[in-house]
Amino acid sequence: MLWLKNISNYMEENSNNKKKIMFLITGSEIGGAEIVVKNIIFNLDYEKFLPIFVSIRPLGKIGEEIGRRCKAVSLDVNKKFNLLFLWKLYKIIKHEEIDILHCHLFHANLIGRIIGKISGVPFIISTIHTDNFGSALRYFLLKITDFLGDKTIVVSQKIKDELIKRKIVAPDKIKVIYNGVAENKKIVTEDELNKKKEYLKIEKNYPIILSVGRLNKIKGHIYLIKALNILKIKYPNLRLLLIGDGPEKKILENKIGQLGLSKNILFLGEIRDLDIYYQLSDIFVLPSINEGFGLSVVEAMSNKLLAIATRVGGVPEIIEEGISGYMANPEDENSIAHVIDRILNLNEEEKKVIINNAYLNFKSKFSLEKMISNYESLYLS
């Protein structure tokens, strides 16, 4: 087990006067929960807090980025399960004299509660990013370990209501803190936009749809592709940019080939700097089958891009139908196609009103500053 060495000296100075927070997460590849953890760590007040990052699985891209900011370690759990990692976690907690253990995702929440309690951590927090844990056993395990934690954070009111209804979490221990994103203040020039469109072989007047997310079945990309197939007769120049990678890519590529949409849909892979793609697109679509929150919708709103999302999870808490965006039914290509068609027929003034409403909603409820303030208040409580 190796600590990443590139740690800023100022974080170590007077560390005894700061609260040591261990952020424990299941894995650290690119994903919504992982990005939230990174945003918290990168934006904490380092006069008050000293973060330490631990990934149960080997360090992924997000974990490596975090390692350039603070201590980061992997417990190196992969396909070969070895209970020795529990002892490693216990030793790190004791050695670092952790004040707060903040756990994210199912395995980290479960393990963190148990090892955190055994090792005597004063304050244990679980953040739950979804109400869909995949099996009754997982709900049961979270329920019977709830007493070991001090606070449970959820990223939407819907998750809170569901967990209380199922008696997974005690009502007095649960709190909603919405995920937040940083406002994009980078302006991409017209020349840069035109060059990017030229590179993508997209004509200037072609309407562009953007979708950002890991290519997992739960993200519902297949229904967006089918929706494009419905729209292609009316909008033959419509283009869809898919940003992300994942296990469904081959299946989606095959479907696109079958439908004859290869010219209409572009796979761009994983891209970290998305500014130019938000600014050259006309519509953002999140076609998820299930979604705990919908971080990419907030990112679109912060970039003043008109958003469509399926009516799942915490998404209705982000979008007010017809006011700050539009909703479609999940697993329903006809519904998605209908909403896209509706937006393409709005006039510019109607679009501006919706985009402005969405941006104001982002500023008041879903900004990075708001999220950090809420978490820092929790850490100091």
Image (cartoon, rainbow, N blue to C red):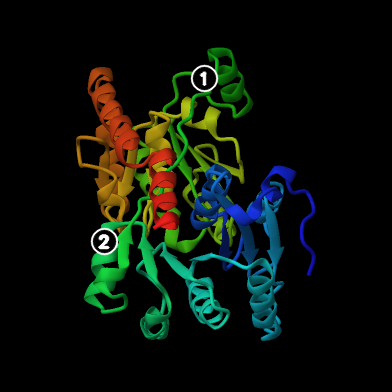
Would you say residue 331 is visible in this rendering?
A: no
What is the secondary structure assignment of the residue under circle 1? loop
Q: Nearer the viewer, residue 244 or 112?
A: 112
**Could you classify mark 1 by the number of other residues whose Cα lies within 10 Å: few (under 14), some (14-19), or many (20 or more)?**
few
Q: Nearer the viewer, residue 240 or 86?
A: 86
Q: Earlier in the sequence, mark 1 or mark 2?
A: 2
Above or below for 94 versus 67: below
Q: Nearer the viewer, residue 46 or 163?
A: 46
> Residue 90: horizontal and vertical position, in percent?
64, 78
> Residue 134: horizontal and vertical position, in percent?
41, 76
Residue placed under numbered mark 1 in the picture: 187
Residue in view at x 58 percent, y 45 percent? 46
* Disc 1/disc 2 C-alpha distance (Å): 35 Å
What is the secondary structure assignment of the residue under circle 2? helix
Residue in view at x 23 percent, y 66 percent? 161
Dot 1 amino acid type? Ile
In the picture, the quarter occupied by the C terminus is bottom left
Q: Is residue 195 left or right of residue 330?
A: right
Dot 2 amino acid type? Lys
> Residue 165: horizontal and vertical position, in percent?
22, 74
Would you say residue 269 is visible in this rendering?
A: yes
Above or below for 124 versus 311: below
Above or below for 109 versus 192: below
Q: Which mark is residue 158?
A: 2
Q: Which mark is residue 149?
A: none
> Residue 75: horizontal and vertical position, in percent?
69, 72
Image quadrant assignment for residue 347: top left
Residue in view at x 31 percent, y 78 percent? 168
Q: Are marks 1 and 2 in contact (CB under 8 Å)?
A: no
Image quadrant assignment for residue 26: bottom right
In the picture, the quarter occupied by the N terminus is bottom right
